[in-house]
Image (cartoon, rainbow, N blue to C red):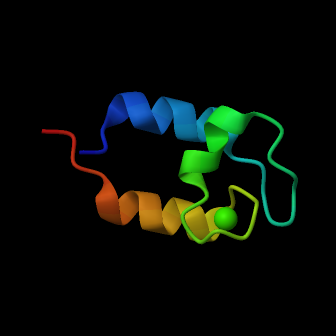
Amino acid sequence: MTGLFDYDRFVECLSGPNAVIEDLNCNCFDSDADNDVGLVDFGLFQLAFDDR
Ligand SMILES: [Ca+2]
């Protein structure tokens, strides 16, 4: 389940397209496996979001 706690971490990790992931704990948010945490990853994050 992905909720508000994960959202807070995602925002901290959001770096934009083609930006290098510096915090290894942010790799889990790279859903499209292109080595950044960008808007495509955010779209996939939204699909998984369920704050119940
Ligand atoms: Ca990515």
Report x, y in % for residue 45: 44, 58
52 horizontally vs 35: left or right: left
Quarter occupied by the N terminus: top left
33 horizontally vs 17: left or right: left
Q: In the rendered image of this protein, does residue 35 appear above or below residue 29? A: below
Q: Which residue is painted at 64% across and 47% down in the image?
A: 27
Report x, y in % for residue 21: 80, 47
Q: Which residue is painted at 49% across and 67% down in the image?
A: 43
Q: Which residue is painted at 31% across and 44% down in the image?
A: 2
Figure disc tally:
0
17 horizontally vs 25: left or right: right
In the image, 10 versus 24, the foreground residue is 24
Q: In the rendered image of this protein, does residue 14 appear above or below residue 17? A: above
Quarter occupied by the C terminus: top left
Locate ligand 1 by image quadrant.
Answer: bottom right
Q: Which residue is painted at 55% across and 41% down in the image?
A: 10
Report x, y in % for residue 17: 80, 65
Q: In the rendered image of this protein, does residue 1 appear above or below residue 9? A: below
16 horizontally vs 47: left or right: right
- Which quadrant holds residue 51? top left
Residue placed furthest toward the front: 24
- Which quadrant holds residue 39? bottom right
In the image, 10 versus 25, the foreground residue is 25
